[in-house]
Image (spheres, helix red, strand yellow):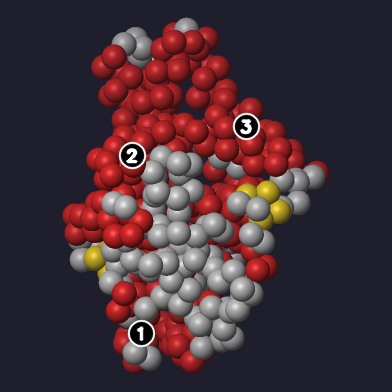
């Protein structure tokens, strides 16, 4: 299915009103929509933690205690750089300076991804079409998981609410080993084509891969041998993968979110872009300062989806405006109060999707909160 095939209704009053209220908030407070000193402090802290864990391991004896003692926190710093640094950089939300955004976006290349492909699959495909089955790449886990109505069901999915947790650990590993290369060769993601990188974009892709493989495998292999190096990478990438996958899942793959199967007859969705974001995205733990700091505002994914080019340091305040505006327009702002509530909701949703397809809610072309 081509991405252009999904037609949405024109701009809603909700979207117009929300934009005006958010603009007014920035005018009243005199704040800039980009990041401020908080972003720099956080980036330095995460980068320092990351470098300390990598360097600490290189200087260690390479035994099991070192592999786990440096590898587990490294996985968390690794994911943290994804949540809080490269994400804002690649959305051009980090700074008013394009070079800073590009540099912070390149952090993703250094930690094993590709900022070029990310800007295509995340900014363009995922953000435009969250929870749209067959388009949103974040819903695709091969045949292992059934996350949404409209996806194929297999008997093994009856147990997916249990085996999904360790499976999430392999997401970063698969990403490092396969995804970027496979997507680059195919030239499309979920049938959505992209232009292959040229010039500076291609240079960044190649240099990023060289830097990543150097620190993740080559240098530790020269110090300890390939087996120990591979184990350290596996442990840290496994932890990183679980953190990345769970945070994504808590925002989109929970009972409170709606899923959309695009109409095949060419008719349009009875939702506009902003209403689609609101229906398919769920916040969690808004009052948890540690989650808000570490997750780069991804516990405020509703705000992020509505204003991806605004830096995440502003999200807690903007979430209040989104909730009030949604209520004034008779729309539902969805939020799980705690991390635990969100985890439980994800578990229940996956259990429901793993039952026979007939027991799951029907796919929706125009999602209704009443379906839940
Ligand atoms: Zn984003």
**Residue 209 numbered tag:** 3
Residue 243 in the figure: left or right of residue 190? left
In this view, the residue in front, 48 or 221, is 221
What secondary structure is found at the residue carrying circle 3? helix
State which mark lies toward you, 1 or 3: 1
Whether residue 318 is visible: no
On screen, residue 115 above or below 238: below
Foreground of the two, 69 or 226: 226
Helix, strand or loop at label 2? It is: helix
Residue furthest front as drawn: 358
| Badge number at residue 156 | 2
Q: At x 37% / y 39%, what residue is drawn?
A: 168
Alpha carbon separation for disc pair 1 and 3: 44 Å
Residue 133 as seen in the image, left or right of residue 181:
left
Residue 117 vs residue 193, the one in the foreground: 193
Image coords of residue 2 (percent x, y): 67, 61
């Amino acid at each position: 299915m081509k991405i252009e095939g999904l037609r949405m209704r024109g701009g809603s009053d909700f979207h117009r009103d929300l934009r005006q209220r958010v603009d007014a908030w920035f005018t009243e407070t005199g704040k800039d929509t980009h990041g401020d000193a908080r972003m720099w402090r956080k980036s330095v802290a995460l980068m320092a933690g990351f470098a300390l864990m990598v360097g600490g391991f290189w200087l260690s004896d390479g035994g099991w205690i070192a592999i786990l003692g440096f590898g587990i926190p490294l996985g968390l710093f690794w994911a943290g750089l994804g949540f809080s640094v490269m994400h804002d950089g690649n959305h051009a939300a980090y700074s008013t300076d394009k070079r800073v955004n590009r540099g912070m976006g390149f952090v993703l290349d250094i930690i094993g991804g590709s900022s070029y492909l990310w800007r295509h699959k995340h900014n363009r495909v995922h953000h435009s079409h969250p929870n749209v089955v067959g388009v949103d790449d974040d819903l695709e886990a091969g045949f292992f998981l059934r996350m949404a109505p409209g996806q194929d069901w297999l008997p093994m999915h009856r147990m997916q609410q249990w085996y999904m947790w360790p499976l999430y650990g392999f997401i970063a590993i698969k990403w490092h080993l396969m995804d970027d290369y496979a997507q680059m060769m195919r030239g499309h993601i979920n049938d959505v084509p992209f232009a292959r990188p040229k010039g500076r974009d291609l240079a960044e892709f190649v240099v990023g891969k060289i830097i990543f493989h150097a620190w993740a495998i080559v240098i530790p292999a020269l110090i300890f041998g390939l087996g120990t190096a591979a184990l350290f990478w596996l442990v840290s990438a496994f932890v990183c993968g679980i953190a990345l996958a769970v945070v994504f899942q808590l925002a989109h793959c929970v009972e409170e979110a709606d899923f959309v199967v695009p109409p095949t007859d060419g008719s349009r969705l009875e939702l506009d872009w902003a209403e689609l974001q609101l229906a398919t995205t769920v916040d969690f733990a808004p009052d948890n300062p540690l989650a808000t700091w570490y997750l780069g505002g991804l516990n405020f994914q509703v705000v992020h989806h509505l204003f991806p080019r605004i830096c995440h340091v502003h999200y807690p305040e903007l979430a209040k405006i989104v909730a009030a505006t949604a209520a004034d327009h008779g729309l539902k702002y969805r939020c799980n109060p705690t991390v635990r509530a969100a985890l439980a909701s994800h578990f229940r949703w996956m259990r429901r999707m793993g039952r026979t397809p007939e027991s799951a809610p029907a796919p929706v072309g125009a999602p209704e909160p009443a379906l839940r």
